[in-house]
């Protein structure tokens, strides 16, 4: 049992949640479910799953004027701070470019559509848990375009990396993989305060505003 991947399923349709649970293979243990933003944040904080399978459109967003697509985004932004090692995989009926880009910017590690088979979803869950980024084929182009990682722009990515020292690059990769400051400090044998200093320098040099943006930046450039 210890080798099972612990997963939370977030979707506002109970029939879909039940069907998905039945379709997932024996390597995945569904440890919780939720139907709205508040419920999702609570169950993720309590269960600290390896992966959250998350619908993009969810009820329960309280931000005034927030568009419907921000439900999944709100879950990622809030729950990431409560369970920093958890990775998020969007699973939605929507294949709209704006939905894909927004949820990836929020910190999701992948986005697949509900037309995927149970086997495909299970493979995607394992891939995301292992640190890979996963997208349904027709959605990958949206992500590449949005994050400037299309073919021919590798030189730009190299130039951006060149702004960082070797130590900053090490810290960047670990933070982007979901490590806490303390975990990075232990991994690199430096203090948590030094890690914080390096992260601030990385964000400043790459012109990013949060660790979620850093994860998306690194993922889009296949640096994880």
Image: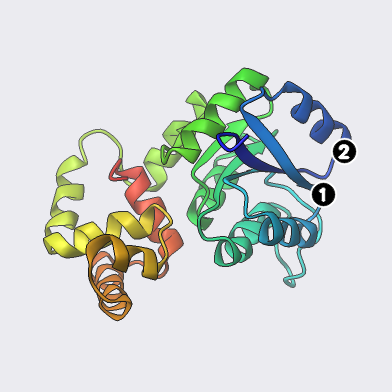
Marking on residue 14: 2
Residue for point 48% across, 24% down: 137
Q: Give percent across and percent down for residue 35.
A: 82, 49
**CA separation, marks 2 and 1?**
8 Å
Q: Assess whether mark 1 and mark 2 are in contact (beta carbons under 8 angstroms).
A: yes
Residue neighbourhood size for the residue with mark 2, other residues' Cα within 10 Å, grouped as few (<14), some (14–19), many (≥20) = few
Q: Say left or right for 38 vs 44.
A: right
Q: How many marks?
A: 2
Q: Which residue is mark 1?
A: 35
Position above or below: 198 against 221? below
- Secondary structure under tag 2 reads helix
- Secondary structure under tag 1 reads loop
Q: Give percent across and percent down for residue 186.
A: 31, 65
The foreground one among 71 and 46 is 46
Q: Give percent across and percent down for residue 90.
A: 61, 41
Residue for point 62% across, 55% down: 48
């Amino acid at each position: 049992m210890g080798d099972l991947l612990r997963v939370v399923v977030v979707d506002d349709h109970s029939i879909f949640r039940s069907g998905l649970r039945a379709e997932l293979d024996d390597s995945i243990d569904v440890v919780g479910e939720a139907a709205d933003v508040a419920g999702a944040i609570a169950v993720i904080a309590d269960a600290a799953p390896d992966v959250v399978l998350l619908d993009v459109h969810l009820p329960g967003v309280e931000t005034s004027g927030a568009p419907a697509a921000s439900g999944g985004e709100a879950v990622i932004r809030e729950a990431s701070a409560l369970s920093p090692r958890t990775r998020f995989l969007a699973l939605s009926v929507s294949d709209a470019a704006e939905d894909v880009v927004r949820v990836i910017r929020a910190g999701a590690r992948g986005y697949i559509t509900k037309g995927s088979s149970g086997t495909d979803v299970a493979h995607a869950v394992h891939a995301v848990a292992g640190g890979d980024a996963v997208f349904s084929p027709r959605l990958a182009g949206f992500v590449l375009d949005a994050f400037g990682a299309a073919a021919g722009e590798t030189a730009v990515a190299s130039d951006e990396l060149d702004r960082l020292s070797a130590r900053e690059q090490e810290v960047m990769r670990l933070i982007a993989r979901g490590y806490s400051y303390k975990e990075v400090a232990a991994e690199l044998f430096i203090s948590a305060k030094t890690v914080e200093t390096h992260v601030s320098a990385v964000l400043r040099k790459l012109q990013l505003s949060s660790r979620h943006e850093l994860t998306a930046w690194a993922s889009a450039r296949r640096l994880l």
